[in-house]
Amino acid sequence: MISKKKLSMREIRKIRVRKHVLGRPERPRLAVFRSNAHIYVQVINDTDGTTLAAVSTLSPDLRDAVKGLKKKEQAKKVGMKIAEVCKSKNIELVTFDRAGYLYHGRVAAVAEGAREGGLKF
């Protein structure tokens, strides 16, 4: 175990949440990562260790669509796009993994966009 001094509080929350959130084939994990400039979303099957779908603000089909928008609006578009990709792969149920981030701002916008796109969690 790594001492708490070496881990940030977000990483501690991430470890704590990840104990309970597990992506299974019938209900994969929707994982969110946000940097200062971009937001990344993946749908992961943890039993196989495979990524089923991935979308970010750097994706070629979204890059031009999100240019000039505010970060929360970009996050919502990423959420809607991941829902579209999941629907095409017959994935409707997911488990939301906020990765230690507070459910607020861009992380909440991704969840809102994914729900609007048709994902259930």
Image (cartoon, rainbow, N blue to C red):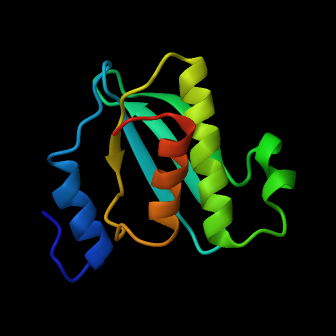
**Residue 63 percent location from the top left of the image:** 81, 52
Q: Which residue, as the protein is rendered here, is positioned at the far bottom? A: 5
Q: How many marks?
A: 0
In the rendered view, tell whether residue 7 sits above or below residue 49. below
- Judging depth in this view, the residue of 30 and 15 nearest the camera is 30
Q: Is residue 4 left or right of residue 76?
A: left
In this rendering, does residue 65 appear at all? yes
Residue 28 appears at what percent x and percent y? 35, 30
In the rendered view of the protein, which quadrant contains the C terminus?
Answer: top left
Judge whether residue 7 can be spotted in this image.
no
Most extreme residue toward the right is 64
Q: Residue 61, located in which quarter of the rendered image?
A: top right
Give the residue drawn at x 41%, y 41%. 30
- Pinpoint residue 27: horizontal percent, then vertical percent: 31, 26
Residue at image location 60% in from the left, 19% down from the top: 88
- From the viewer's perspective, tell me whether residue 3 is left or right of residue 120: left
Q: Residue 120 appears in which quarter of the rendering? A: top left
Q: Position of residue 59 (x, y in %)?
A: 74, 45
